[in-house]
Structures are given as C-alpha cells and as structure tokens.
Image: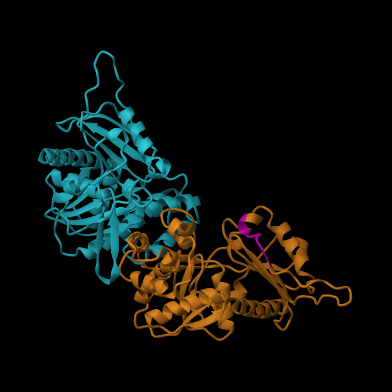
Chain colours: A orange, B cyan
Amino acid sequence: MIVPATPSAATPLAEAAIVGVDWGTTQRRVVALDARGEVLRELADDQGMLAASGRFAASLAAVLRSIGPLAANAPVVLSGMVGSAQGWHDVPYLDCSVSLHDLGARLFRVPDAPDAVDCSIVPGYRWQGVDGAVDVMRGEETQLFGAIALGARDGWFVLPGTHSKWVRLRDGRIERFATYMTGELFALLSRYGTLASVLRDAVDDDAAFARGLRAAARGALSNSLFGCRAKVVTGALAAASARDYLSGVLIGSEWHDALARRAGDGVPLRVIGTASLARRYARAGAVLGFDVITMDARAVQLAALSALQTSIGLRSVNRL
Amino acid sequence: MIVPATPSAATPLAEAAIVGVDWGTTQRRVVALDARGEVLRELADDQGMLAASGRFAASLAAVLRSIGPLAANAPVVLSGMVGSAQGWHDVPYLDCSVSLHDLGARLFRVPDAPDAVDCSIVPGYRWQGVDGAVDVMRGEETQLFGAIALGARDGWFVLPGTHSKWVRLRDGRIERFATYMTGELFALLSRYGTLASVLRDAVDDDAAFARGLRAAARGALSNSLFGCRAKVVTGALAAASARDYLSGVLIGSEWHDALARRAGDGVPLRVIGTASLARRYARAGAVLGFDVITMDARAVQLAALSALQTSIGLRSVNRL
C-alpha cells in the first residue's frame, strides 16, 4: 500500500485538479494530480469492486477524504470494473467504431456521487468479430487513452495481467482485440490441482521460461499444461523450474495465438505493464524474435488522467 | 458407493479368483471376479492415494476384508496412481516400445502386501516425442489392455476424464499419446475465479456445447475461456448455458488438437468412458464430423482383469 503524504500544519496540502481511481475487482489505486499533471498524492487499497459492493458512494467519499483536498469542480474519474454489472453502475460498452480520441466525451456521469463531486466512469469497449466472437475490456481503454496521449496511436499493444489484452490500434481506433486468461490460469494452477505441489519452492529460471514459450507452440494449452507435470515426474524438468516453465507455456500460448492473427503486420509491439511483467513479455518477444517497446503502466495511467482533465475541462468551459 | 453383496449364513460367499483395485488419486474401485471373469462383488470408496498415504498395506487389508474371501493364491492387481511417486511404490514407467500385449508379464510385485497376498501393481507408460515432448499415463494402460482383450487393438482411443488421454494404438503397441487437462480445468474454473459465478444454475444446452466446440477451433484456449465470460456479459450467451459452452470449449480444444495431429489417419476412434462422458464425446464427434465407437469403462476394466488373471495364472504355472 502506498500511503499518502503526511499532512503538515505548516504547509497546507495543495488542492488536486483531478483525481483518478483505477477501481478493479479486488484492488483500487487512487491518484491526485495538479493542473500540470504532476502527482500530488496517491494511495492503493484492497477496497476493490467486490469489497465496496453495495456502498460505493460511501467508499469513494472515504477514499477522497484520505487523498486530500480537491479544487472546486475538480473531476474524479473512475475506471475499471466499477463500471460493470457487478460494480457501482453498469456503464454500457462502447463499440470499437468509437475512437479512443473521443473517450473523454463519452464518460458516464455518476448521478449519486458523494458531496456533489463531479464524478465520472470511463466506459469499457466491446469488440465483435466474425462467427459470433466477442470480447470486452474495462480499464484497459483508459491505459490505451494514456498511450495515445503519449503519442503511441498505432500498432499492437499488450496489456498483460489477470486477463491479458492484445489490442490492435490504428490511428487511435481499436481495430480488434483479444483477451487471454493468462494471469488467472497461472493463479488457479499455482494454488489448486495437480500442478500446485510442483510449483512450490520455485527458483528463477530464464531457460525454463524459454522452453515453456517454445512448448506452447506445439499444440493445445491443456496439453502443454499437463506436459509441465509430465516433464517433472519423468525428470526432464526440475520441480524448482516448473513455475517459470508454466509461466512460459501460458504467456507463449498468448504470443503464438496473437502472432498467428497478426502475421505480416510488421507494426510496433508495445507492452503496457509493471516493470516485472513488462520485462517478462520483452523476454518472451526476444525468444520469439520480436522487439518489444515497453511502456510503464503508471506513466500511461497518469498521462490518461491529464488528458482526461483537459477534455473534461473543455466540456465545463463549453457548458458556461 | 457400490456396496458389496450382503453375506448370508445360508449361502457362503464364493471365493474370488482375482481382485482388481483401480486406485486413483482420490477414488478407489475394487472388484472381485470368479475364474470365468464374472463379477462376484464390487465396491467403491474415497480411500484414494491421498487418503491412504502412509498406510497402504493396512488400507488394502481392510478393503480385502470388505470384498470377501479370496481363493488361495488369487492375485490382487492394483492400477493407477497407487504406483506413482506419491503412491505405495514408485513403479517405473514402461517405454512405449513395450507392447500392451506384454503388460501381464511386466507387473510390479508388491513386497509388503498384507497377509502374504499375491499383490501386483500395473506399471504406467511414458511416451517421448520430438523436441523434448514427454507424456505419462498411470491407470489408462490397464483400460487399453482390456480394450485389446476385447479385440480392439488398432486406432485412436480417447479416455476422457480429469486428464483426458488420446492414444494411438497400432497392433497393441502405443505409438503416441497426449494428455489434456480438460477435466481438471473444468473443475477449477467451475469452482474458482471469474467464470465460476456464471456457471452456477446451469441447464443442459446441446447447442451451447456445439458452439463451444466450434469456438475452440479459432485459437488459444485461454482466449476461448475468456470468450465464455465475454459472451455472457454482452448477452450473446445465456448464463445458464455457459457451463455447456465451457465444456464444449475445453473438449473441443482437445479434439481440434488431436485431429490436427492425426490428419488423414482414417482409423477408428473409440472412446472408453462412463456412459455420460462417452455420450458427450460422441456428440462432439458428431458435431465435428467423426464417428465414435464407445466402449464402457467398466466393461473394459473387467476384461483387463480377466486377461491379467490368465497371464498371472500362466506365470504361476510356469513357476511350478
């Protein structure tokens, strides 16, 4: 948990020009920026959507008190699962025909915000493919908006995590995207079932990660997953290396699938993630022969907030 | 649990000529046959490998008392995970160059069986592919041995379950096989994580199963799995149908992978399973354009025991 700067009687806290809340299923990250986009204060807690369920307004009021003073009319922008059917308000998905450039004009105004705060939820996106294929995102669109604000508006964007996204942007428009349950499967398999016992007491093993990446090219994921166990019981893989092998299999499955869909595309591939995840994806790219540009997830989120503040500010001016 | 026939003072119990124990990770099935291979008595309990760990001899002694009298020198044959590193004895895997025809001569004699019973463990098989691919089975080899005893010694054999096996037999020899973590993933995803909540209150939906089967052809499993959730939250799939859709995705992933590996093979495809699982795989075959021959798992297991009794009997005769 990142604690807010301690208030001091000598130096009154600067008022925030915008507060962003990345409100996910289990975690919540809050940041207060000044008018120039500089971070004044930030905090993180475990009051995610599930924990705050049924008392979102009170939960937001409490966290706003913690994050310190807001300037008059300073917007509060929420993104992530808080806008889902299980969240505070079920904000309809945008269709991918709506450019990310227009995201600031498509925010959902929260009608029951505490203390009459100017509070909005960023809508997610829905992609519709052929044969009834469909995919959804909530939260990642805000990061992509931030990437665009930083000048990256074309190419493939990978947002690794519980539900990894591979997104093809063309001049700020989402052309297509695909979600992979990579992080969730890793967590489930590490905790329960056949593989869990061999994944304990793991050591870092880049070579095992690379082997897993390559094994994932050979066929079905459910077969490669069992292969991890088969390798350990036959002595072909040290149990301590099984965690990195499994990580390679899961991330590799994502890469091989995504590469098959973008064959010959030849555009830049950017990973938006925390340092450790971005490094892992960059290593996967190196093993599979692709250069990866990494973008820090926090920097992208801050850029998104700054850019949203500008568009919300413009909206307010137009209202006058 | 199948209870043994009630002993009666009027009619003394017939002595068993062989007892088979299918001793898996969590379940145990025991059957006593007469010399003609007819079932005298059977039972099932939850004293699998994990529950019996550290006291296998006592656990076997107890279950033999329950199953009733054995003829003098009647063999007791154990198969499944009881022969693994976490089981009673770590019985080495056979290489696939050893024909299943020779399985009866390769049993592992248990040195510490209770009451000097003639007790053996059936060894599993290890398959070694190119590029370091490796796979293992324990228990399924006994079923395949039974299928051969019933005259089926060529073609593809599917043994669905927690860890589904697709096995290519050629004249009783295992040419190759692949394991898919299908049942385990279904169980994990039904119980934990993002999909669990939408899988409750399910109804039977053959059409959703078929949709899942076809969706699995499109790409990575971790993407199709998230697709199940995306379809529900966008209204493209009723939540009550998500369980059969997920089942289709998981089983379909197995089928598409196995079919890619056996393209143009044109040999019979047999499913060895319980009635409900065999029906599900037969339906998958019908959707994907393949005829499936189903073999009942219990009938195959009984045939294996009868055939093992003959080979163990021959071994005893040779010893005289």
Name the quadrant of the N terminus of chain A.
bottom right
Counting labels gives 0
Residue A45 located within the stretch drawn in magenta? yes
Return the residue nearer the eye: A47 or A100.
A47
Using residue B290 as the reference point, say whether residue A294 is left or right of it. right
Q: Is residue A160 above or below residue A292?
A: above
Return the residue nearer the eye: B128 or A119.
B128
Residue at image coords 62%, 58%? A49
Residue B28 seen from this side: yes
Q: Is residue B246 above or below residue B308?
A: below
Return the residue nearer the eye: B99 or A153.
B99
The furthest residue to the front: B320
Residue A115 image point, x, y percent: 78, 63
Using residue A106 as the reference point, say whether residue B257 is left or right of it. left
The furthest residue to the top: B10
Residue A300 image point, x, y percent: 59, 79
- Chain part drawn in magenta: A44-50
Q: Quadrant of residue B276?
A: top left
Using residue B75 as the reference point, say whether residue B52 is left or right of it. right
Q: Is residue A170 above or below residue B89?
A: below
Name the quadrant of the C terminus of chain A.
bottom right
Return the residue nearer the eye: A282 or A15.
A282
Residue B287 seen from this side: no
Residue A187 image point, x, y percent: 49, 60
Q: Quadrant of residue B204?
A: top left
Residue at image coords 37%, 60%? A229
Residue A131 image point, x, y percent: 35, 64
Residue B264 located within the stretch drawn in magenta? no
Residue at image coords 53%, 65%? A93
